[in-house]
Every structure is written in C-alpha cells, then in structure tokens.
Image: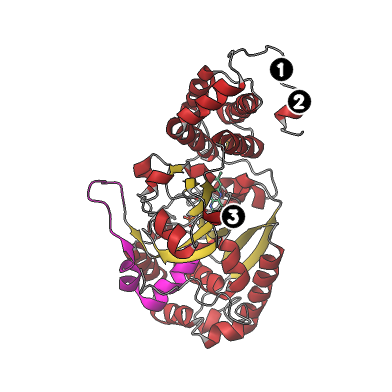
Amino acid sequence: MSEFKPVLLASVGKPESHTRKVYEQSGGYQALRKVLKTLSPKDVQEQTKASGLRGRGGAGFPTGLKWTFLPKDHPGPIYFCLNADESEPGTFNNRILMEDDPHQVLEGLIISCFATNSAVAYFYMRCEYPLAYKRICQAVAECYEAGYLGKNILGSGYSLEIHVHRGAGAYICGEETGLIESLEGKRAWPRIKPPFPAVEGAFRKPTVVNNVETVACVKHIFDRGVDWFKSIGIPPDPNNPRDAGSYGPKLYCLSGHINKPGCYEAPLGITVTELIEEFGGGVWKGRKAKAAIPGGISMGLLKENEFHCKLDFNGPGKFGCLGLGTAAVVVMDETVRMVDFLLNSCRFFSHESCGQCTPCREGTSWATKMMTRIKHGKGRLKDLDLLLEIAENIGIMPGTTICGLADGAAWPLKNCIKKFRNELEVYIKSTNPSGWMETAAVPALQLLDIH
Ligand SMILES: Cc1cc2nc3c(=O)[nH]c(=O)nc-3n(C[C@H](O)[C@H](O)[C@H](O)COP(=O)(O)O)c2cc1C
Ligand code: SF4
C-alpha cells in the first residue's frame, strides 16, 4: 500500500489542473495519440477486456466485455453515454475528477468512444454540480480547439462530437436506462431489459453507458499498459467462480464521523479499517465506530467488527452486503441510533422510487411509514419481521422490479435488522412497552418527520 502512488488523483490540487495546458504538460493526450495512431477499435476493446477493468458506477460489470455486446458492423449510429449523475449518497469521486482533472475524463471518454465506434457522446451530468459543469464545458471547448474532438481527430479519420447534458437531479437518472429516457427528454423511468442499451439504447440505437471513473481508468490503461493495470488490486477469488477479480486503482469516498473526510485513491482491496485509519485519521472526537456503509447506502451496512472487510468487488458480499457499489464509505460512530439510520435510509429510497413497479413504490413507502411509527414510539417487535419480509420481496434479485433501486432500498433494511436487531428491539420495547399500536394513522407531519 505504502508504495502505491495515486494515478487518478495525481493532478488534483495542482494549480490550474483543469486546463488543457497543464494537462498536456504532464503527458496528457499522449494515450489518445498512441491509440489513434497504432490501434484499431477492436484492439482497444481487447486490451480493455484483458486489463480486467470493471465498471466503477456501482455494478462492477467488466467494461471491455460490455463493449463487445454492441452489434458488429453496425451501420450506425452508436451512442456513448457518460454517466455523471452521481447520486448515490456519500459518493463524490466523479465530481472531483470533473472539477480538478476534466481532461483526464475526456481523454478516457474519447478513447472509449473510439473503441466502441461511437461518433456522438452524451455527457450526462447531475445539475447540482455547477463547477464540474463549467470545467467540463471549458475542457470540451479546449478539445475542439486542439483537434482532439470534432472531425478527423488528429488526422486519424475518426470523428467525435460531445454534448454535455444536465439532469434535473433525481437518483433514478443514474440508472442507465433511466438516464437514457431522461436524455431523450422524458421522465427517467427505467426500461425493462432486455433489450439492453448495447442493443437498443438512446434514441433506440446501440448505446454504451459507462461511469466517469471507468473512462478515467481507460486513459491510464493506454498510457501505462494492461500489465500495469493488472498489477494493482486483487485476482479472482478461487472460491467464487463468478468473481472476475478487482484490478486497478479505485477512488474511495470517505465521510461521516471521521477526522479527515475526503476522496482517496488506493488499490482495490483496501480494508475499511485501513481506509479509516490510514486516510481518514480515525473516527472523530476519539469515539469508537459503530457501523459503516461500504459503498453507498444501497450496499447495506457493516458492523464495526466487520471492518476487516476488503473493499473490492467481492469483499462486501462476504459480509452480507450487496457489493462494493460506488466505494463510498460512510462511517457512523457509537452515538448513532440505528433507528435513525434506518428511517433516513427508508425515506431516501421511498422519495427516489420512480413509482413504476408496485413492490418498489409501495414497499419503500410502507417501510418508511413503519420506521416512522417505530421512531415515534409506536413500534411492535413483529414490525421487524414485517420489514424483513418487505425487504426480501422487493428488487431485481427476487425478480419483482424493473431496476435495482429496490434492491438498494432492501439491503440497508436486511443488514440493519439482522446485524442490529437487539438494539432495535430494545428501542421498540423501551418506547412502546405495551406493544400497543393505535389504529389511527400517525399524523402526517410525523410521517414526514417534521417537528
Ligand atoms: C438506482 C440506480 C442508480 C444508479 N446511479 C448511478 C450513477 O449515479 N452513476 C453511475 O455511473 N451509475 C449508476 N448506476 C449504475 C448504472 O445503471 C450503470 O450500471 C453504470 O452507469 C454503468 O457504468 P460502469 O459500467 O462504467 O459502471 C445506478 C444504478 C441504479 C440501479
Ligand atoms: S424498481 Fe423502483 S425505481 Fe426502479 S423502475 Fe421500479 S419503481 Fe422505478
């Protein structure tokens, strides 16, 4: 770990790091030149596949493999959507890259578009990122000036246009087909899959959707080579035939009750403890940690005695979590009440559910109502089993919803009730000793938790 030097964040904090001039001074756009001069799109796909790069947006799908799902010899157009919606709670690594090193992102995007024969890319960015928007627009303009974008890029015969599009700020706009619907000017309702975007995506044409950090990694694979990329991280777990390994550098967002919150770069596979102690300066105010979310709230919850969990694509699953997600770690100290954590989580997902699927729409709001009742001293012990039953029955995993938002809503419920059941039971018993539940509805203001 100690010999690892940041790559993705290497320029962050340097003066004028967002300008093309500074980027080129540190070797920027050399990878693009090399790719356009010496490689075919198929070569780029193959090398990306060989690098073992997996998507950084949450699902960890192998990037090169995803690109090969595009129809061969398609007469066009093929679209590339760069997912910069970044709405997962606790996640801000895309913002740092876009604000402080936008050309790194653009170089990776241009190489990725070349690999997928895309002539048009849509840079879909959440609207709450005004500085990132400004920096990306400036960087795109600088790229057109320098001949890195537009017609016949660097004399290679390859042409590419980039359109920067701002979303209106909804979590569901980050789901790839919700993003595509939103881009097309509609409500961001995720589409039933198949067809997957690679076959039928934006404007019903073959489309690739990748995350900002994913394409930033692509730039470095072609700067430093496949072997360099594979030398970082950890190989597949021999006990898990479905694990494709976790290679390359990763950006970890660390926040919550921590001395030094921030975005840190480390090889995939760092443990939660290492992240907190070596980067975060320990838990704040000298307190003990109680729990942490491992990769955005939708991934569930780790207890403090599980902090030896490795933050690779395979690690959090070994502790009952959904996965690595966005690698956004939010630390909770010993003063946090799990009833508050869970109510907050439930409220978020019911607010963000797009409402298309009944199990998600009704399940998330039912869970929120129950958690509000519990919080206000009207809970019953059997509510915990009812909440678990809701959680077990909503999502793609049980096959009842269109997209993964409902799985993300279910995991904090499952993990929190299983791992902190005793605390929740003590809370329910102490706030409602008789176990009585009034049949009258909880007042509306209490449901909204407004006091
Ligand atoms: C509810 C929901 C929200 C999502 N939000 C984002 C997001 O903000 N950014 C992102 O890159 N991926 C997000 N994803 C994952 C995308 O659907 C998709 O897998 C990803 O953009 C693919 O890029 P990658 O392969 O480079 O990771 C979300 C998924 C779901 C189910
Ligand atoms: S799972 Fe939820 S967010 Fe996803 S499509 Fe269904 S209702 Fe919408």
Question: What residue span does the magenta drawing correspond to?
Answer: 214-243
The mark that comes first in sequence, 3 or 1, is: 3
Compared with 132, 319 (above or below) is: above
Task: Please give the label number shown on residue 86.
Answer: 3
- Element type where label 3 sits in the image: loop
Is residue 113 something one can see in this rendering? yes
**Ligand 1: does it lie within 8 Å of the C-beta at label 3?**
yes
Q: CA distance from mark 2 to mark 3?
A: 31 Å
Amino acid type assigned to the residue bearing label 2 in the image: Ala
**Image position of 183 (left or right of 239):** right
> CB of mark 3 within 8 Å of CB of mark 1?
no
- The residue closer to the viewer here, 239 or 214, is 239
Residue 219 counted in the magenta span: yes
Residue at image coords 46%, 66%: 265
Q: Nearer the viewer, mark 3 or mark 1?
A: 1
Q: Nearer the viewer, residue 218 or 58?
A: 58
Residue 25, horizontal then vertical, whole percent: 54, 88
Q: Which mark is residue 441?
A: 1
Q: Quadrant of the C terminus?
A: top right
Q: Report which quarter residue 1 is drawn in.
A: bottom left
Q: Position of residue 102 (x, y in %)?
A: 59, 72
Residue 74 on the magenta segment: no
Which amino acid is tagged 1? Answer: Ala
Residue 69 placement (x, y as % from top left):
41, 53
Q: Does residue 157 sit above or below 83 in this rendering? A: below
Q: Tell me, yes or no, whether the two marked residues, 2 and 1, touch with CB atoms within 8 Å.
A: yes
